[in-house]
Image: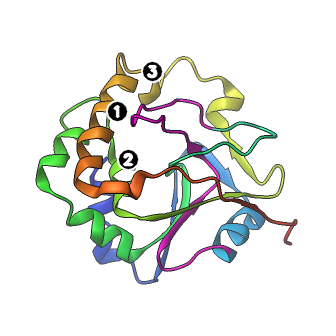
Amino acid sequence: LNNRWVKTIPYVDTELVLNIDDDILALKPAIKCMVAHASPATIVGPFARAVGKYFNYSTDERVVGKRPDYALILPRVMILTKDHLREYAHAPREFLRYIDAEPSHSDDILLNLVSRHKLRVIPPPSTVVDYDRICQNYVTKGLGTTKHRSFMRTSAMRTMGLHYGDSIALLSDTRTCDLVR
């Protein structure tokens, strides 16, 4: 998982970078919405994750109809910059164990820690489709079903959070977009 952030840098020719998982469909209006809110210091995406008071990891990804505090933008579909990739690549080497050696795969946590500004954007309805949720893909079971993953990710967040200070602070800024054609 570390490679998607580090090995891609030489191949990125633009300042903005779109990261999208292979089980996500993001239509043009959703991407336009995220790009409209993008800035050099901010990672932007619709999937957010809450973090508790003591850096407790939460699996509650989205709360429909509410504006919860959150601290992590998940890289399922996200706009970030080449500078975010560079900052990630220069993170302390000891954090790599939380990404590649342990099944917590905390690359998204590290990315959010090095990216001090985060913005949750709610794209127009039906412009981001999560095939895993629609298909209820219980056959392959993704990383989220790894035993004790929440505990491991809480541990990773606390350890890396000590290094980065308050950059994991809770945010509640959520923006929306009118349907863009």
SS assignment at label 3: helix
Question: Is mark 1 in CB contact (under 8 Å) with mark 2?
Answer: yes
Residue closer to the observer: 79 or 118: 118
In the rendered image of this protein, does residue 144 appear above or below residue 2? above
Q: Where is residue 181 in the image (x, y as percent from the top left)?
A: 86, 72
Q: Tell me which secondary structure the magenta stretch mostly adopts.
A: loop
User: Badges 3 and 2: C-beta atoms under 8 Å apart?
Assistant: no
Residue, disc 1:
153
Q: Which of marks 1 and 2 is nearer the N terminus?
A: 2
Disc 2 marks a residue whose amino acid type is Ile
Image coordinates of residue 27 in percent, x first then y, are 73, 60
Inter-mark Cα distance, 3 to 2: 17 Å
The quadrant in which residue 63 appears is top right
N-term-proximal mark, 3 vs 1: 3
Instruction: Please report the bounds of the magenta region as a residue range.
Output: 37-61
Image mark for residue 145: 3
Q: Is residue 83 magenta?
A: no
Q: Is residue 24 left or right of residue 177?
A: left
Please identify, in this view, whether the residue under mark 3 or under mark 1 is nearer the observer: 1
Which residue, given by chain and number where applicable, does mark 2 sit on? 109
